[in-house]
Amino acid sequence: MNDLISKAEAALQRDLCDHCLGRLFALRSTGLTNEIRGRNLRSAVALIRSIRDDEPPIHMECWLCEDIFDNVDRYAKSAAKKLLEVEFSNYLIGTRIDPAIVEREERLWSELGGDEAEPIKAELNREIGKVVGPLTGKEVEFSSPDVVAIVDTRFNHVVLDVTPIFLYGRYRKLSREIPQTKWPCKKCRGKGCEKCNFTGKMYQTSVQEIIGDPVLEEVEGDEHLFHGMGREDIDALMLGTGRPFVLEVRGPKKRTLDLESLYDRINLEAKGRVEVLGLRTSSREEVRRVKLVSPDKSYRVTIRLNGKVDKEKLNEVVRSLKGTAIIQQTPLRVTHRRADKARERRIKDAFVESFDGEMMSLVLTTESGTYVKEFVHGDQGRTRPNLSQELGIACEVISLDVIAIADDANEVYP
């Protein structure tokens, strides 16, 4: 006890408020606020000094915080007012304070020891948060709040850091003319120019915009991001049960969504270009899972055979390619944006769906990351073996459809 009083008396050589005095010993005991702890310590020091016939410390303005805690109610009202601009179920308070205050606190710790101390920002966040709760009728949430209100105590200014909304679903792409995500104009980089008709985009729309724009409007958000489980080429269809995705909407003012109504709206406004399935709420953790998984994929490829081949040989060659490991050098069509290196991929399954002498439909299941078009035509020998090489004739890809995406257990996802 003597060392506690001695340290408190030494601290009061500086003019400290009860909050800043008590905070020096915050980790020594529980069940008390820093203010009450500091008040009790101040009284104990005054009693000891009176026994010694010394004058008690005189308190004017806190040397450390400049009596910032006197403004807690004002900060809380500003935070509550700002918070009520958005829909939220829970919240957290953060603060920005004058760096000089933090510097003085660290100086005090270096002089007296800070092992038992709590930082001023932690106490300020807590005290403001305790007042904001009754003003908003909401609860504090420390691990995953809907919104963080950040109070700049220098100017009594509040900004909100709103947690994004995440929606999971699967999409079917039924158009060969739209990309999966927004594609900024290469010439102006999204600023708008004559080449892109001042839209800033290479393509008028995308799967991302068709799905994301209605959601953005519903929640009054700032922007959306699209996290797909891989992507298909622009001229490829995505069929079957669709491709899993998570849509992230940043800065939403609303958080409650009628998913059934939203599902109907997206599919109606898509006008047959895209179809959404299985829309539900999601999370940032699911974004990581969707981006990390590397599922096998099944394709239907329509191929023109520029040469004669009989059905028996065709079937024999296709059967021989089943289970084959192929080496693919980065395709010529993407070397401008991807490193030129060799990759090994495996053809898991292959069979001829139809054949009329000039055209064939080939169904393939391949390892994730396989360049299917190049496997068919060979890409000037950059993919080996390839279908064209094995048949001894040129093979031209007419169309490519993704018909299934499998998970790690090779089951149709999800």
Image: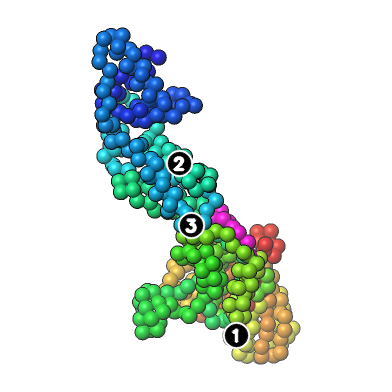
- Count residues near mark 1 (Cα–Cα under 10 Å), then give few for <14, some for 14-19, many for 20+: few
Judging by the rendered image, the residue that carries numbered circle 1 is: 398
Instruction: Tell whether label 3 touches label 2 (CB within 8 Å).
Output: no
User: Which residues lie in the magenta part?
Assistant: 279-286
Q: Is residue 394 above or below residue 370?
A: below
Q: Earlier in the sequence, mark 1 or mark 3?
A: 3
> Residue 246, image x and y in percent?
57, 63
Q: Earlier in the sequence, mark 2 or mark 3?
A: 3
User: Residue at point 28% right, 31% down?
Assistant: 62
**Secondary structure at numbered mark 2:** helix
Q: Give the distance between the C-alpha atoms of the residues marked 2 and 3, in whole angstroms.
A: 18 Å
Judging by the rendered image, the residue that carries numbered circle 3 is: 86
Residue 327 in sight here: no
Q: Earlier in the sequence, mark 1 or mark 2?
A: 2
Q: Is residue 204 above or below residue 169?
A: below
Tell which tag, 1 or 3, sits nearer the viewer. 3
User: Residue at point 68% right, 82% down?
Assistant: 361
* Left-right relation of 87 to 351: left
What number is the disc on residue 232? Answer: none
Residue 14 on the magenta segment: no
Tell which tag, 2 or 3, sits nearer the viewer. 2
Q: Give the distance between the C-alpha atoms of the residues marked 1 and 2, in whole angstroms.
A: 66 Å
> Residue 208, image x and y in percent?
53, 71
